[in-house]
Amino acid sequence: MNGSSASVTTFLSVQPVEATDDAFWDQFWADTATSVQDVFALVPAAEIRAVREESPSNLATLCYKAVEKLVQGAESGCHTEKERQIVLNCCRLLTRILPYIFEDPDWRGFFWSTVPGAGRGGGDEDDENARPLAESLLLAVTDLLFCPDFTVQSHRRSTVDTAEDIHSIDSCEYIWEAGVGFAHSPQPNYIHDLNRTELLKLLLTCFSEAMYLPPSSDSSNTNPWVQFFCSTENRHALPLFTSLLNVVCAYDPVGYGIPYNHLLFSDYREPLVEEAAQVLIVTLDYDSSTSSSPTVDGTTTGTAMDDVDPPGPDNLFVNYLSRIHREEDFQFILKGVARLLSNPLVQTYLPNSAKKIQFHQELLVLFWKLCDFNKKFLFFVLKSSDVLDILVPILYFLNDARADQSRVGLMHIGVFILLLLSGERNFGVRLNKPYSVRVPMDIPVFTGTHADLLIIVFHKIITSGHQRLQPLFDCLLTIIVNVSPYLKSLSMVAANKLLHLLEAFSTTWFLFSAVQNHHLVFFLLEVFNNIIQYQFDGNSNLVYAVIRKRNVFHQLANLPTDSQAIQKGLQRKKKTPEPISRTNSQDGVSMEGSRPAAPAEPGTLKTSLVATPGIDKLTEKSQVSEDGTMRSLEPEASQLSPEGNPPTALNDGEPWSGEASHTRRDRRRLSSASSSGQWTPTPDWVMSWKSKLPLQTIMRLLQVLVPQVEKICIDKGLTDESEILKFLQHGTLVGLLPVPHPILIRKYQANSGTAMWFRTYMWGVIYLRNVDPPIWYDTDVKLFEIQRV
């Protein structure tokens, strides 16, 4: 497809061409020296649309012919350089054209129809000929991905005449990389890597039909391309799944530990790894909240992931992922994901000496899918402190992205993963490990545990993130509540941060300015109660901080409820524009070598996200029994949450994030509450939740300890914290506190709302990351909006 091909596409739009005119069609793929970038440059969007509108039959023939060439290449095994070139050119051409087929609803069914009279030589293959074009295309691409000497190493060292017949080879022997289910690591071959990358790009483009449909909550809306590709029709499903997973998890971007290595050698693996990660997460786009897979008669069977007995999901990739169970496979996956997630944090003494990968968002989606679909993997992750190798990079990304409007999606997925992990007791226990790795982060210097790190980062997000993160506050505090019963010893820095949050959230203007703001106070009180009741002994720092800030608790207990006081509280809001003041939070010096979190560069592209469900839909309450096991609370029992407020109707329709309408978003804003004019606080409303504030434990603690601390100060003329802390360390409240409340954990539960959120987020990431060539740029995408910051 040389320079003249531009005129060829123009010709296509005006003159119908016979399908049999091979000399004409061959000029599209016969040329030798093209790249995918050339194809994008030579075939402009306007011309593809012109052919589609003016000469639909020519576009149909072009697609059909290109697929036919791929099928022929797959049949013959691509033994000559010329055949390989034709296959790659058809691949590039289809990658260019498909988005323009998908954006037009009239064309969407085209690939799922059979092409009349398009038999492949003779009528003896009628059953084969009846395949829709899409199926022929997908099967040809999967065959080509295991084509000896084209995409995999040939096992036979001999002449062409004994070349391996592509239909007789067992592709399980040709898995691309050692790892899960495969022990042999093939010799790296950059030509094979390049060819695989081009074929995977075409696959991803086939799957991207999902981008051209508006978001819908209907989870039965399956992607026909993915459905067929991940079905038993694809004889390479298992080796392909394994190849993609292993290529991603085995990748080491540092390159043999030689600094600047990545500047000397072009890394052919990285584009393949990125493409593999993207194809993998798209094939795993499956709504697990239907939690069971439909059986043949359409009824559903138990949960697809927990039991091996019911048939797993029809999607083989989800099925295989959910059935991985060997410890060494889990270790390989976890180590690989942790290595890659930590890559942007690897600080070397030589700037730019290590290669920085860019696909951490795809990795986070993959990690989420692994934990969501394979509970054994989740338990493996939490079994050792290896989970901290995932936690630290996530906290790094959250802290780094907190001021950047274009990275709201990254903030959400990081928080979702931590919410999922926090539902398991082991996560809280693991957080007690001392934090010694000093990743440069823009947070105060502290000495303590991973729990301290988590609390300090969350405090930073809440006090200095941008406005659009406010819907995440519920979620951040839920995570802290979930882990709080297991935290053995908080540092003074983290203890002060928690009290600063309580102080900020319990001001009257904040409590009265939105219908659900008081939930945040309930969450924080629950954190203090859990620590005092279950971990009093090691937490003298927190107890001291509570004593120092005791007025905050007294003010809450005496919160005024009359109309006049409510109005006065709201007036105070107008004078305080800053949502949460950062004064008196005692932010120390930030860590050495850290950069402050920066906002997005103006003009940065971002994709919109759908709203996610409220915290009450996102989680389900479980009670921890004496023996440490969890019992799910019946919805009736938890109708009154521990805060005792019935779930507000608002949470149903209240977007929890995303591109909500302005009135809704403003209602959530700390500083502009009733601008929507729909809701005003009343004395009854304040009373309804004030009476349920769980203050008994803290008040009892203050009642017992404050006089003792004051006495020490007077007796010894003390102003020295260390003496008081020493006293508190040896104090005990055994028998003096109310009976400990049962521990409540809010566990993430899959639901179709989050499934849809993941779909829009994932495709948004893929859209923005594929810029060379810009596969979907300027096409009429419907799943999300492309916006500029």
Image (cartoon, rainbow, N blue to C red):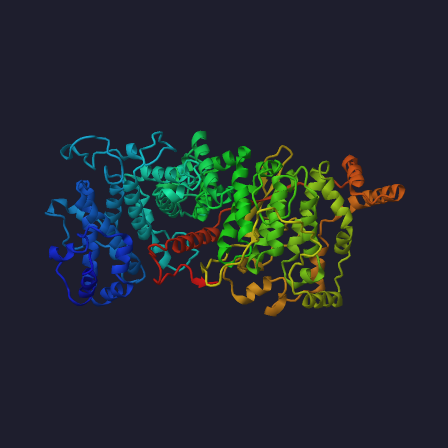
Query: What residue is shown at x 54% (from left), y 42% (from top)?
Result: 391
Tell me if residue 748 can be seen: no
In this picture, residue 711 sits left or right of residue 95: right
Location of residue 480 in the rendering, given as x and y in whole percent from the top left corner: 62, 45
Q: Is residue 605 above or below residue 310?
A: below
In this picture, residue 311 sits left or right of residue 378: left
In the image shown, does 685 or 136 lie closer to the viewer?
A: 136
Location of residue 310 in the rendering, given as x and y in whole percent from the top left corner: 40, 37
Q: Is residue 606 above or below residue 624?
A: below
Where on the picture, by quarter, is residue 62?
A: bottom left
Location of residue 582 in the rendering, given as x and y in whole percent from the top left corner: 67, 56
In this picture, residue 219 sits left or right of residue 478: left
Task: Work out which quarter of the rendered image holds the N terminus and state it.
Answer: bottom left
Where on the picture, by quarter, is residue 392?
A: top right
The residue most toward the right is 715
Location of residue 143 in the rendering, given as x and y in whole percent from the top left corner: 25, 41
In this picture, residue 515 sits left or right of residue 356: right
Q: Is residue 606 above or below residue 443?
A: below
Tell me if residue 173 can be seen: yes
In the image shown, does 632 or 464 lie closer to the viewer?
A: 464
